[in-house]
Amino acid sequence: MTSRFSPYVIRVVAICYILSLLAPAPPRVYPEPPQSVLTMHPLVCAHTRLTDEVEDWKVQQTLQLVREMGATTIVELFPWAYIEGQRDAFDWHHPDRIIEMAHNEGLQVIARLGIVPAWARPDPNKQPTTLNYLAPNYYEAYGEFVAAFAARYRGKVDRIIPWNEPNLTFEWGDRQVTPEEYVQFLKIVYQAAHAANPDVIILGGALAPTLEPEDSPVAMNDLAFLRRVLQAGGGASMDALAIHTYGFTAPMDDPPSPDKLNFRRFELLIDVMKTFGAEKMPIYITESSWNDHPRWTNAVTPGQRVEYTLEALRYVEAEWPDVRNLCFWYFRAPTLTRSYPDYFAFVTPEFRLKPIYEAVQAYARGWKTEVP
């Protein structure tokens, strides 16, 4: 029988196979003694993106760099769809490895829980939906998942963000949600989580900063959304408030105003909390940053990014003692998007440190530096 492949093709395939055998194995992860974070500013926190990181050594190196930067805390997404791909069948490998590695580096973990499994969404043949679609009849199923997570990691993860940016239609699977419905959702989750782990801290809010009006089909103004959440009694179903605040093109000291998006917009959300008597509730800024893309209209220069970021850390520490963490979006991603989101990163996928990393490290560690 005559071969369909020429001798040349066969040689090429053979050479490729031999080269694959000679390729170096990926670095191994060796157990290290427990570490501790050396920092003078425990406010510093990094929003990591380890969800889709495949190789353990990359997870370990990312977390090591977070520690060496002087950050005490990470925020990390743990997808419900990854952990409970089938109802009541949990696969804890992904969160186990990240949480264990983080604790070995001396880092605290704020867990963000989202991404809906297929079994909790409608039949795609009848109603196509996105991974963020969560109908009210599955709120209890999500609450059971949060409870299982809270129970498993009691003593290791005591702060949970049960959803991300609920004032954006996109984050609810293109299903427009009202603040009052979010309160119903939050109440179910809060009760389930605290029944499983009385020490858990549920961070409500995590609202996206936006100037969209209340009747917008794509989003709702974050100030209006929070006001209606508290009017509906949502304050009883959160132990702390998570806030997202971005600088965009404004300097750190640009004063807050309801008609502007800037870093100090978070103060307006705190004012709303005070209006409802919740001024003693702890605050966590779980997303914040400036972007230094060379062509994005909402970006600043790399030098401005460093300056504004350090000013933000100093300002929050001096003026807002109730803010427990200032978490920067984001530390490092497994791959590039080749667009403006890449310029939020502190470290490249290849583990090259950006100037923003070195500036925050010098600040957090208390090193003398010429950085402003």
Image: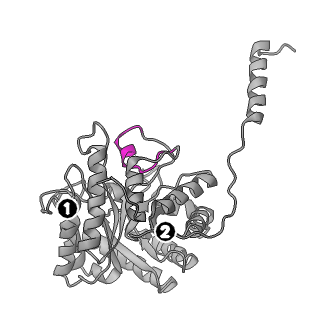
In the rendered view, would you say 74 is above or below 146? above
Residues at badges 2 and 1 in contact (C-beta under 8 Å)?
A: no
- Label disc, if present, on residue 168 of the rendered structure: none
Spatial separation of the CA atoms under disc 2 and disc 1: 39 Å
Element class at badge 2 = loop
Q: Nearer the viewer, residue 311 or 97?
A: 311
Mark 2 Cα-neighbour bin, 10 Å: few <14, some 14–19, many ≥20: some
Can you identify the residue that label 1 sits on? 221
In the rendered view, would you say 105 is above or below 169? below
Residue 177 visible to an observer of this rendering: no
Image coords of residue 212 (percent x, y): 18, 56
Can you identify the residue that label 2 sits on? 38
Magenta residues span 338-349
Question: What kind of residue is marked 2?
Answer: Leu
Image coords of residue 309 (percent x, y): 30, 57
Colouring scheme applied when the structure was drawn: one colour
